[in-house]
Amino acid sequence: MDKINLQKLTCKDKATFDKFFGARYCEHSGYTFTNFFMWRKMRDYLWAVEDDVLYIFSESAENFLAWQPIGAQEKMQEAITKILRVAEENRGDRKFMFVVVEKIFAEELARYPHAKFDITAARDRFDYVYLAPDLINLSGRKFHGKKNHLNAFRKKYPGAEYVPITEEIIPRCRAELNVWAETHRRANPDNPFICYEQAAIHEIFDHFDAFKLKGGAILIDGKVAAFTFGEQLNSDTAVIHVEKADQNVRGIYAAINQNFVEHEWSEMIYINREEDMGIDGLRQAKESYRPIKMIEKFNATLAEENF
């Protein structure tokens, strides 16, 4: 078996990743090049293509992790064998596991004949998926609270304006991002994720057109009070990668959420708003929009006797 030549992830790899991700109907929000690019400095991704299968790994001082390989379903059993070989060659004393894989790949791991895996649901990483018309119309009793927040926003800020993100708007989005980050750093000084996310979003703004993203912002008196961006995930679903807003403006999150879907994604059936990362407030907020379904994800470790 030939050695898989792993390489670091860079912006120029987008076309390769897009080709693999676009060749299948994927509901997993993580499988976009945007997501991998945004978090590459935090997760130190390595990747390779062999026999028309895309392999993705990430590593840290403690872990050597494998992401779900992307390719034809009939190649997945052999892909597992190759991933385990790469792990043996590279992990050293570090922990190895498959992370946040789709249910269909977890089933491949369960029937793999050459090793046993302990497979567990990664609930904190489940994606929340909504019907686009629900997010646009906020109709019925179940959305009564959301509609009230939106109406309160419109009443207090009648001059507020929704605009798509363009090169002209990006500098104002960057300014709001910096305010958001500084506010959250003061509240959570020991949380390194805030700085990573801030830097990652700035990088996306650097490449916004090349990444073929759609974005939207709400302006109040010419200042960006909220912004968001996402992209088409599959034939009927858009994924929302980022949503930031001035939390002192009542109803601003309801406004940016509703406006973005209405203006940019009304032709989609579903909107994937990604995961809650186990954060109680975020889970409550995402559940309050009444997801139509959850996209399950799983972690898998080798049983003790295998390594």
Image: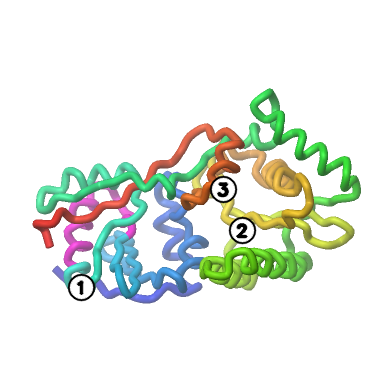
Using the numbered discs, state the Cα–Cα distance from disc 3 to disc 1 in whole angstroms: 35 Å
Q: What residue is at 77 percent from the left and 57 percent from the top?
A: 225
Q: Position of residue 114 (x, y in %)?
A: 10, 53
Q: How many marks?
A: 3
Let me know if residue 270 is in the magenta part. Answer: no
Residue 91 figure quarter: bottom left
Q: Position of residue 80 (x, y in %)?
A: 21, 56
**Label 2: which residue?**
213
Q: What residue is at 53 percent from the left and 67 percent from the top?
A: 191
Q: Residues within 10 Å of mark 3 (few under 14, many from 20)?
A: few
Viewer-side residue, 210 vs 105: 105
Which type of secondary structure does the marked residue at label 1 adopt?
loop
Q: Earlier in the sequence, mark 2 or mark 3?
A: 2
In the image: residue 187, left or right of residue 45: right
Residue 93 tag number: 1
Q: Earlier in the sequence, mark 2 or mark 1?
A: 1
Q: Quadrant of the N terminus?
A: bottom left
Q: Magenta region, mostly helix, strand or loop? A: helix
Q: What residue is at 67 percent from the left and 43 percent from the top?
A: 261
In the image: residue 67, left or right of residue 127: left
Q: Amino acid at mark 3?
A: Leu
Instruction: Specify start and end residues of the magenta stretch as a single range.
Output: 67-85
Q: Amino acid at mark 2?
A: Leu
Give the residue furthest to the top.
141
Q: Are the two marked residues, 3 and 1, in contact with CB atoms closer than 8 angstroms?
A: no
**Label 3: which residue?**
282
Which type of secondary structure does the marked residue at label 2 adopt?
loop
Viewer-side residue, 81 vs 59: 59
